[in-house]
Amino acid sequence: MQSFPSTATSGVTTRKLTLTVVIPCYNEVTTIQQILARVLDVGLVNEVIIVDDGSTDGTLDVLKAIEAEATPNVHVIYHERNQGKGAALRTGFSAAKSDVILIQDADLEYDPRDYPLLIKPLEEGIAKVVYGSRFLGGPRKAMNFWNMVANKILTLTTNILYNAILSDMETCYKVFRAEVAKNMILRARGFEFEPEFTAKVLKQGIRIYEVPISYNGREWNEGKKIKWHDAPKALWALVKYRFVD
């Protein structure tokens, strides 16, 4: 298995870490093969776990073809029925074998070429959890206005409730040492995974390190799945997990 090199530059020592990328996938027949190729092209990944969450659009055929290629360290897990992004991630986390876990969506909104920037604070031992922020100056396609408003409200609520200064709580790119999630009880089945995971990280006293990333958001007619009704669920999760474990 490939691991990150150990180097010493300007007094900062980096550590050898292995990386698992977990890709939750639901009805992404047009993009799953492309995103897998981009993930592998980065050259930093020891293991890729794709969790198909009950796809019905032909994605299964693509995944079966990927399995037939027998690419080393690429594994596919199938849910018989759709359970939600959070459930797919929990399945992927339980199967991961590396030091570090990185969440990658199955569409093309997030660019794996940002991996080195995301992983660097973990390599240098200055963070256990890193979020890739779409609001720290990286190149991005203009977001839907109301999506941005919902994101800002949820992030502000996170900061108020958990005494944090995050800029993008809802980001897909969450990267963390595997032990952070090992004993964490995660209940979310859908998109409320984002606030639940963030809340439980912050309640452990772990400060989240943010780095700027690029973002190429897709439109509703291109298959974007998060909906307006997911925002109240996320808000409730933030409030609930502030006061309960």
Image (spheres, grey):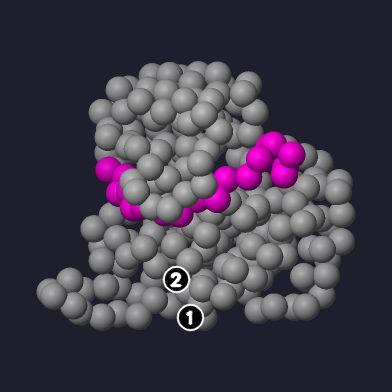
Query: Which residue shows up at 78% across the image and 47% down it?
Result: 27
Image location of residue 221, percent across then percent down? 74, 39
Q: Is residue 194 above or below residue 21?
A: above
Q: Please give the range of residues in magenta.
A: 207-225
Q: Nearer the viewer, residue 56 or 73?
A: 56
Question: Can the viewer see residue 244 in this picture?
Answer: no
Give the SS element for disc 2.
loop
Type of secondary structure dominating the magenta stretch? loop
For residue 2, which numbered disc appears in the image? Answer: 1
Can residue 215 be seen here? The reply is yes
Q: Quadrant of residue 157?
A: top left
Residue 225 left/right relative to 118: right
Percent x, y for residue 226? 63, 34
Residue type, numbered disc 2: Thr
Q: Quadrant of residue 244?
A: top left
Q: CA distance from mark 2 to mark 1?
A: 7 Å
Using the image as rendered, state which of residue 100 and residue 143 is in the foreground: 143
Image height check: is 50 above or below 171?
A: below
Q: Marks 2 and 1: CB-CB under 8 Å?
A: yes
In the rendered image of this protein, does residue 3 appear above or below residue 197?
Answer: below
Q: Secondary structure at mark 1?
A: loop
> In the orientation shown, which residue stands out farthest toward the left?
11
Residue at left 27%, top 43%?
Answer: 207
Q: Amino acid at mark 1?
A: Gln
Name the spot of residue 48 as percent of width and height, x first: 60, 66
The residue depicted at 29 percent of the width and 60 percent of the height is 121
Q: Quadrant of residue 32?
A: bottom right
From the image, tell me which residue sits under label 2: 18
Q: Is residue 210 magenta?
A: yes
